[in-house]
Structures are given as structure tokens and as C-alpha cells.
Image: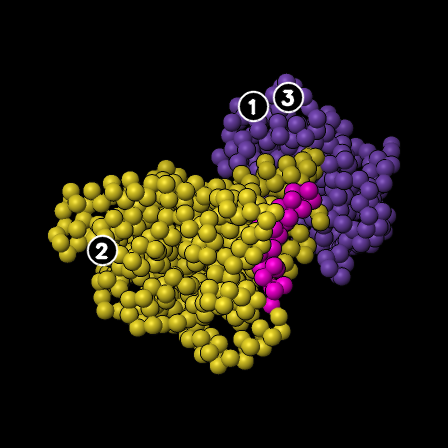
Chain colours: A purple, B yellow
Amino acid sequence: MSVAIRLEGLAVGAGKRTVLGPLDLDVAEGEHVLVVGPSGAGKTTLLRAIAGLARPQRGRVTLFGRTASEGARIVLPPAGRGVGLLFQGGALWPHMSARRTLEFVLARRGVARAARRARSDELLALVELTGFERRKPGTLSGGEAQRLALARALACEARILLLDEPLGPLDAALRAELLARLERLQRELGLTVLHVTHDPAEARSIADRALFLRDGLLVDGEVTP
Amino acid sequence: MTGVSRPLVIAATTVFAVLGLAPIAVMLARVSGADLSDVLGSARTASLLGRTLWLGLATSAIALAVGLPFGFLVARTDVPGAALLRPLGLVPLMLPPLFLAITWTAMSDLRGAPAAVLILAANTFPLVALFSARAFERIDARSEEAALVAGGARAALMMELPLVLPAALCGTCLAFVLAVNDFAVPDYVSSVGRKFNVYADQIFNSWQGAGSSGRAVATALPLVALTLLTLLPALALRRSGAMATLGGDFQRPAALRLGPWRFPACAFCAACVALCALLPLGRLVWEAGGGARGWTAAGFRSALATALENERAFLAASLVWSALAATLCVPLALVLGHALERWRHGRKLEWLAVLPIAVPAILFGIGEIVLWNRDLTAGIYNSGAVILMLFVGRFVAFPLLISSGAVASLDRRLEEAGELCGARPATRLGRIVAPSLWPSLLGGWALVFVLAMRELDAAILVPAANRTVIFKVFNRIHFARDDAVAALCLLIVFFILLPGLLWSLFARQRLEVLP
């Protein structure tokens, strides 16, 4: 199985201070890796560096064999990395309905106008939001909003899904439901998932392995759940 | 420059540089060492500067003393009529200060320095009230409840005051800046009573009397320094005032119960509104309907009809130029405000963005003349285009600060989500940022429209701007006062208030007019 994400000596800073790394990590294609760490450990920074939203200080990020960043140089822009990021809290565009959100993304990906409606309906069906086409984020429940955020990430033609505390605002029932959906989507679409959380219990049931991040460093190597 | 559209920022910066900075730069280039040493060494300069400083300090102290409690009462308490008093409290800020001057000097024996101070304070206290009200509203209910539990109302006040004070002081700084740069009020107060010279007069006289632009600029420099020294802390205070109180899961606090103080508090707020807005407007209505000769509804209607008939062209010109200027300012402010906030070094350039409002309007007007009154640009100089450029250049700083403030409170991840999907910076700005900021962008539009409609100080100098309706009023009150002048003032007030009135009638969201 090929390596989807390879991090070699990756370090990210805020100002002159290093907040993440240096760290090395390989994630195989189709694997679901859980990164657990306390607040401020650098979990979000790790995802942002892989997505190309944070500029590393040094090290290399390789995605499916293509160098995405080398040192502080961004080689592949965020939109060209085949990465979908489920932001903590969703970060949905408040003025766009569910359908407009997805059509906006599809338009950016070059999908022809005529095909956008059908594709957005497909994506909404995939996350079981059929019937919510005209609803704006403010009118969605926490679970529905997270599912729309997931559909948006998938609309980016993502092969790698980065999940930033995706279950944070949800209650136990919704957590279980979203986890089951994530597992199914991962299997059906062959996605590679890197999932960060502060809760060690979260997603252990579906993750292939779990890693611990503390003070920006992976601690004690890899831990199998 | 990541996250911002390079071509858009370069285009907007070029427009801002030509319209907002070039008139200042061209003036600065004319100052000679001799002019500077002449002006700075003069005892008259020191005395005028001292007097102007006193005017600014007295005005802003009164604005703070009135605006802070007014903002607190209408925003956070159960004072009766708060929903009405709050928008009415904004009206004095929208009225041209000249109108307050002509009405209050007619209604009372106020003259000289006290008149200028009180009129400018009446005009600017809503700034402090607006900033304070917003800051009071942004205190999280749980923080307030925690303080109440810990030590009652006194503890709550002690906890809230440091959070609100930066915002209130930011409004006070802006009140100071408006007061020290005002030309029309001291000029009018002097024309009806004891002479009260201020620094802006001196700049005007240096230009009109000696015709020397270098000397006028040299004269203005201490005032520019004074204004910048006030504006820069105001910018910093604006940030600390906005940031200190915003949380992600914000809970709006409940209205505080005033108990037996409800009606005295209501009387205080109503008195502020009455003295600063309703009485001056009432006086104009009275004058327009015949005044001392006996007020009649027919006379009032006739004066309005006459004013509209005679000054229709001036009124239309002011409306068109003001609306056009406001419309041009909005995209410019969006692009530059976003860049200031999102670009790594943007905040270091804020002082440059506020430079057009840091120089006295008189000086900006002279700069327009020096810049455009050339053979090559005579067509522009003699047309309405120069008015448009004057308004845009001078006032774009306000919507720019409003939009950068709004961008600061916009979740950066909304833009990052767009970036991940492949949306280019210009698309993200137009499709993600702008729709999220529309109350601020429309607020910026309304503010520029109001400021342009009441702009007089720079318009006095630029010949093409002499075709504005406010200039017409300024001219006529110095030579005659009749029913039609009062009626014309009322028409101007009506059009100034119209956008805000329409907004409050049809929109649910509040217009954001604060930086």
C-alpha cells in the first residue's frame, strides 16, 4: 500500500518559536490515523501544515509521492493537494445555503454549471442532508452542520480527509452517528483520514492506529488502540 | 502577501494613493525651511495651537462625560424608551455642526469659546456613546454574572469599566480630532459674536491671505502632528476595545434594572437628544415657517417649496456626488481594509490609511487645488470629478477602518475553507468575505454619504465644490437669514438621515458604522 502522507522533519512555528515538530510520520493510503493530544499540543497546526494553510519552518510534506512543501517553500497550493479539511466548529459560510455552499466549491473545481446541481444533490445525499438544500448554517443543528462541512470537504475531490476535532460540539448519540458515517465514507471512497482530537476515546473504534502529540512532538512513537 | 489578491490590492492602493495621499504629498513638498521656522517660531502659532488644544480637550471631555453614560444607559439598562433614544442619540452626529451653530446661537446668548465647545461637544458626544454602547453590549453575560455574584453591582462595574474604557476613549479621541480640525463652527461663532480664532482659521488665512501653499502647510503641520498623536492611540484603543470583550460562545447580557433611577436616567438621555438634536431641528422648523413673524404651516410649506425650487440643482449635485463617493469608497475600503487586516505587515500601515483624516480639511482642499489645477488636468479640476475625488480621498479612511475592524472579527477559517476548495483571493473576497461584512460595508457607505453631504471645510476652497448645497447654506447665512435657508437646512438634514431611516425601517440587522 502506498504512502498517502509523509512528513519528514516537519516543524512549524509561530514567530520564532517552534510550536510543532520536528516530527516524522507516514500515513498509508486508506488508513485512518488518530492523533490525540491536549489543547495547545499542535494538533490543528499539524493539519494546517499538511493542508498548506500554515507555512512550515523546515522539513518536507509529501502527499501521494508529490512534494507539497519543502522547508518554508509551499510547492503545492492548498487547493492542489487533494486534501479536504473539516474545520473545528465547521467554519461554514454563514450566508450560503447548503446547496450554494457545495455549488460554490464545485464551480471552483471546474465542474460545469449544468452538472453542479446534480453533483451537489449527490453529495448532500451522501451525508444524508437531502431536503436541506435551501437551509443556511445558522438554521442547522450541530450534527447537520458537521455533515454539511463534511460534504464540503468531499466536494474538494479530497483523497485525504483531515478532521479537526469533528465530534467536539456533538452529544454522544450524534458522535456515534457521525463516526459510523465517517467509517462508511472512508471505506466507500477509499479516503485516507488523519483525525485529531483531545479525547483519547474518540474514534478509537474506527481508527487503524493512534498517536499521541504533546508539546508539538509525537510521544512514545505509535500506539495501537 | 498571502490571502489577498495582489492585483486588486495594487489597484486599490494606487487609487488611494492618488486620491487620498497625493494631495497631502504635493503640499508637503512645498514647505520650505524658511516657512517652517517662520511659523514654528511665531508666538501667534503657539497661542492659536494652545487655544485649539484647549477647544479639543474641553470638547472631548464633555463628549466623554455625556457619551459614556448615554451609551451605557441606552445599551445595557431598562431605561424607558431605550429603543427610540438610541437611534435618536445618533442624530446630532449626522447634523452638520454648522446647523447646530446657527440654531444655538439664535436660541441663546452663547458666543465665543463656550459656544464653540458646547456645539462641538453636542455634535461629537454620539461618537463616545456609540463606542461605549458597543463595548457594553459585548461583555459576556457570564462574566457580568460572575462579578455580580462576587461583589454585587459595584464589582460588576469595576470589572466592566476597564473593558469599556478603551472603546470610550477611542470615541473621545475621535471627538478631539473632529473638534480641533473644525473650521466652520468657530468661524460662524466668530461671525455672530466675539472673535474666537482657532488653528484651522490660521491655515485658511495663510492660504487666502498670502496665497502661499507652503506657508499654509507649514502652519498646518503642528495640527497634523497633534491629530496623528491622537489618532494613533485611538486606533490602538479601538483594537483593545474590540478584542477584549469578544468570545466565541458569546452570551448577550440581560438589561440591568435601574429601579427608581429609571426615570431620572430616561430624563438625562431625553435631555441629551432634545438639546443636541430636537431643539436645533425644531428651531429650523420654526424659522422655516415664519419664525418671529408668526409660524404658519402654509409658510413652512411655502419655504420648503421655495428652497426646493431654487436650490434643486445644488441639492441634486450634493446627493449625486455624495452617493457616488460613498459607492466608490465601499469596494476600495473592502479591498484595503481586508489587506490591512490579513496582510502580515498591514497593521503597521494603518497610520497611512488614516492620514487623509489626520490633515485638516482645509489643507486637504488646498492640496486638491495644487494637485489638479494645472493645464493638463484643467478638465478634471473644473468638473464634478474633482468633488468626487475630494470626497473619496478624504473619507475613504472611515469605511476602510470599519471594514478592517469587521475583517478582524471574521473567522479566518471561512476564507481558508474557500482557499482549500480552490477559490482565488479575489473570489474569496467577493463571495465569502464581502457577504459576511455587508452590515459594515453598508455602514461605511452611509457614513461616507453623511460626511460628504455635510462636508464644508474643504469645499469652501475647491471652486467646483462650491456647487454643493452645504456651501450654499454657508454663503447665505453669512449674508442673510430667511425662511428658505432654514428650509434648505431641513431638506439637507432629511436627505442625510434618509439612508439610516430606510435602513431602520426595512432591515433587521444593525448598521455597523464603527471602526
Give the mark count.
3
Residue behind mark 1: A130
Q: Residue under mark 3: which chain is it in? A: A
At label 1, the amino acid type is Thr
Q: Are marks 3 and 2 on the same chain?
A: no
Q: Are marks 2 and 1 on the same chain?
A: no
Measure the alpha-carbon separation of dots 3 and 1. Answer: 20 Å
Q: Is residue B232 left or right of residue B290?
A: right
Q: Residue under mark 2: which chain is it in? A: B
- In the image, B466 versus B152, the foreground residue is B466
Residue B187: horizontal and vertical position, in percent?
Answer: 37, 65
Residue A80: horizontal and vertical position, in percent?
Answer: 77, 35
Tell me the element at label 1: loop
**Dot in front, 3 or 1:** 3
Measure the alpha-carbon separation of dots 2 and 1. Answer: 62 Å
Q: Does the magenta run of residues contain B5?
A: yes
Measure the alpha-carbon separation of dots 3 and 2. Answer: 61 Å
At label 3, the amino acid type is Arg
| Magenta segment | B4-31
SS assignment for the magenta stretch, majority: helix
Mark number displayed over residue A113? 3
- Characterize the local packing of mark 3: few (<14), some (14-19) or many (20 or more) Cα atoms within 10 angstroms: few
State the residue at coordinates (41%, 59%): B127
Residue A161: horizontal and vertical position, in percent?
Answer: 72, 36
State the residue at coordinates (83%, 53%): A58
Residue behind mark 2: B283
Tell me the element at label 2: helix
> Which of the two labelled residues, at mark 3 and mark 1, occupies the earlier sequence position?
3
